[in-house]
């Protein structure tokens, strides 16, 4: 049987036959229906499902009960470089999408979803068509047949390098905020405090959460305009080359307290956007 003719994997109690034929037909590996062959009644629904799978941001693939690849969407092709025509019909990932030394462990992890309830989450490295390695995070779950028994596995995966880098940055930021011996305040693009560390909360004479989201005018009796002008300039032009002295008067239950803050500024931009998107000022 040709790889593009596999039609035996059910999905949610119904066959994904139409999805496989549709995906393979787009890649030119399946014979067109002959003039005497009737159109399958579920073709429209299967083509729609195939289009939805191809339009998803997550890479999707599926395996039958023997571990043979039965489905492969466009995002999977984008990440690894293997087309549906090249992937469908292969026995697992061994010999093409994973190192031989890792193939057994990866297959065991993926197919274990057939015997486990809910979704299984794993991380491992896959191989791209050009020989590169990609660290992915997978979520897999069993595909059940009409009798309720496991008939295969579907798997969604995505690259995790960017996510891991982001998690490390967040962890580092939180550690620096907590351990810093100076006051750190992060204000959002509306110039309202979004994060305040313990040292800054003491300097403001307030709790760390009580100042979040409030206008600076609620916290300062004087110096608000000068501080907001400085923050607006940083958002628009970037940080000044040297620290600045900002005179303010704090509102406290005991009355106003005059302070001079020697302040450095840094503009925060999203690391996930193609163009720098200001998130606020530290």
Image: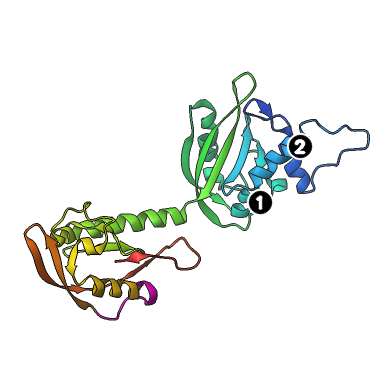
Query: x, y (%) of residue 118?
Result: 48, 30
Q: Identify residue for label 2.
A: 44
Mark 2, Cα crowd under 10 Å, few <14 / some 14-19 / many 20+, is: some
Q: Kindly identify the residue that appears in the image at 75 percent across and 43 percent down.
A: 24
Query: x, y (%) of residue 220?
Result: 18, 65
Residue in the foreground of this view, choosing between 222 and 136: 222
Magenta stretch: includes residue 281: no
Query: In this rendering, which labeled residue sits more in front, label 2 or label 1?
Result: 2
Lateral position of residue 164 relative to residue 153, left or right: left
Q: Which mark is residue 116?
A: none
Q: Which mark is residue 82?
A: 1
Q: Kindly identify the residue that appears in the image at 25 percent across and 73 percent down.
A: 225
Q: Kindly identify the residue that appears in the image at 21 percent across and 60 percent down.
A: 218
Residue in the foreground of this view, choosing between 204 and 264: 204
Which segment is the magenta one? 235-242
Query: x, y (%) of residue 87?
Result: 67, 45
The disc, 2 or 1, on the residue closer to the chain's N-terminal end is 2
SS majority, magenta? loop
SS under mark 1 = loop
99 up-or-down from 223: above or below: above
Which quadrant would the N terminus be assigned to in this image? Answer: top right
Q: Is residue 93 visible?
A: no
């Amino acid at each position: 049987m040709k790889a593009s003719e596999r039609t035996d994997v059910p999905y949610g109690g119904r066959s994904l036959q139409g999805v496989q034929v549709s995906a393979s037909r787009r890649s030119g590996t399946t014979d067109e229906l002959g003039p005497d062959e009737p159109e399958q009644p579920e073709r429209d629904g299967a083509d729609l499902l195939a289009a939805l799978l191809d339009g998803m941001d997550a890479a999707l693939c599926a395996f039958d009960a023997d571990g043979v690849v039965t489905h492969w969407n466009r995002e999977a092709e984008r990440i690894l470089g293997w087309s549906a025509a090249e992937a469908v019909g292969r026995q697992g990932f061994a010999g093409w999408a994973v190192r031989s030394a890792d193939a057994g462990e990866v297959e065991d992890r993926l197919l274990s979803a057939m015997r486990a309830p809910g979704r299984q989450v794993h991380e491992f490295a896959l191989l791209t068509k050009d020989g590169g390695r990609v660290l992915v995070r997978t979520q897999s779950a069993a595909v059940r047949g009409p009798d309720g028994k496991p008939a295969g596995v579907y798997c969604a995966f995505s690259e995790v390098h960017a996510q891991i880098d982001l998690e490390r940055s967040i962890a580092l930021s939180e550690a620096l905020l907590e351990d810093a011996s100076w006051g750190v305040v992060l204000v959002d693009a509306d110039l309202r405090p979004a994060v305040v560390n313990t040292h800054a909360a003491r300097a403001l004479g307030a709790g760390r959460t009580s100042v979040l989201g409030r206008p600076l005018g609620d916290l300062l009796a004087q110096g608000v305009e000068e501080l907001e002008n400085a923050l607006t300039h940083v958002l628009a032009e970037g940080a000044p080359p040297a620290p600045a002295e900002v005179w303010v008067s704090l509102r406290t239950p005991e009355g106003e307290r005059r302070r001079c803050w020697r302040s450095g500024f840094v503009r925060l931009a999203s690391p996930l956007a193609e163009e720098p998107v200001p998130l606020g000022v530290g």
